Image: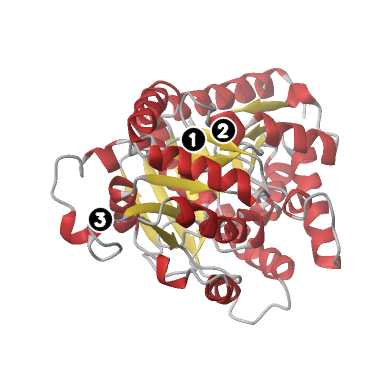
Amino acid sequence: MRVLMFSWEFPPHVVGGLGEHVANLVPTLASEGLEVHLVTPRWAGGPSEEQGEGYVIHRVDPPTFDAPDIYTSAWQTNLAMEKHAENLWHSTGPFDLVHAHDWLVAFAPVALKRSLKTPLVATIHATERGRGRGHLSSDVQHAINNAEWWLTYEAWRVICASRFMAQEVTSYFQTPTDKIDVIPNGVNADAFARWRGQDLSTFRAMYALPEEDIVFYVGRLVYEKGVGILLEAIPRVLQEYPRAKFVIAGTGPAAEELRSRAALLGVAQKVLFTGFIPDEDRDRLYCVASCAVFPSLYEPFGIVALQAMAARTPVVVSEVGGLAEVVRHAETGITVYPNNPESLAWGILHTLLRPDWAQQRAENAYRVILEQYSWPVIARRTADVYRRVIEERARAPW
């Protein structure tokens, strides 16, 4: 089976969960016996062609002019990706299907689907309307929403990472429920297991004093991730547990506003904004943290929660979107009311004040990770969708 995949993100260019997902899915699909070619923009360098065992990464140089908005940038970049993919198709032979990850790469795959009469699978990782909590306020947002609808319409099947995301796609785009497959994101537990038993005290000392317990957040610093809610909860936590130290890793447009808010709340000395951190440092921070917290207001899935669970770190998450499906309250973590600093503070304190209970939940979560969220499991389920599409295409007139 030959698969032609498109993604806006791939290492070294990874912005969020989509990039993590594709970076792990491609080689795991290849290890399952599929031949995968990924076409992606060359945003952050890297070789124009990178070969692995059973897969090839094709990085396409995007247009050099400054686009007025993200929609125009995506459209122009897709023209370059489409041309590259057509050349690849004719030089290496046809593909059995095309797989697009989100609207940013919708234009090229849809064009190939139509011109080459090849079925299209689409994974929807998030929606513009969902990020706006149901609202679209600008012309660009409306254009993105229309592109998302168009992609789900053109796709033979649509993959969503959670039941929440599937319901959103059905509600916003009227996508038939029997056209959607729910396949969660995965996580590589080995990335964290390598640090177990190692002395991380020197690394830990870069972020907290020996007597402090680290409460760790990692992710984009944007409104929908709820970091502002976390800051509002910090004074409540410190009042009862002054040994807490909050490490907030990531970048985003809200960074300066969040730093200013921490100062106004009088907790700046207890909050460390690290900015961007490499994956290796992120993984080690999970391992030395007493609690990982993800207070999102909107979260289609929440791959960061899986990472914490794979690291056997106790998690506290807002009961919203995909997070509510990944974390089972009092079994594999603590879930709290979204947009509620008091509830979030309670969840953090419950974790810090009862470390034996917290660790038991973490062990439960780790077992769930191995059984349900390993990348081989996710890749096999994705390949099953591919096979279904190819079989249906063989029986259907175009």
User: Which comes sooner in the sequence, label 2 or label 1?
Assistant: 1
What type is the residue that disc 2 sits on? Asp
Residue 96's disc is 2
Image coordinates of residue 375 in percent, x first then y, are 41, 32
Image coordinates of residue 285 in percent, x first then y, are 32, 53
Q: Which residue is label 1 attached to? A: 2
User: Which comes sooner in the sequence, label 3 or label 1?
Assistant: 1
User: Which comes sooner in the sequence, label 2 or label 3?
Assistant: 2
Q: Nearer the viewer, mark 2 or mark 3?
A: 3
Regarding residue 275, the answer to whether it shows in the image is: no
What type is the residue that disc 1 sits on? Arg
Q: Which residue is label 3 attached to? A: 211
Regarding residue 231, the answer to whether it shows in the image is: yes
Secondary element under disc 1, as helix, strand or loop, is strand
Residue 18's disc is none
Between residues 271 and 287, which one lies in front from this camera angle?
271
Image coordinates of residue 231 in percent, x first then y, are 56, 61
Residue lying at the far front of the rendered structure: 240
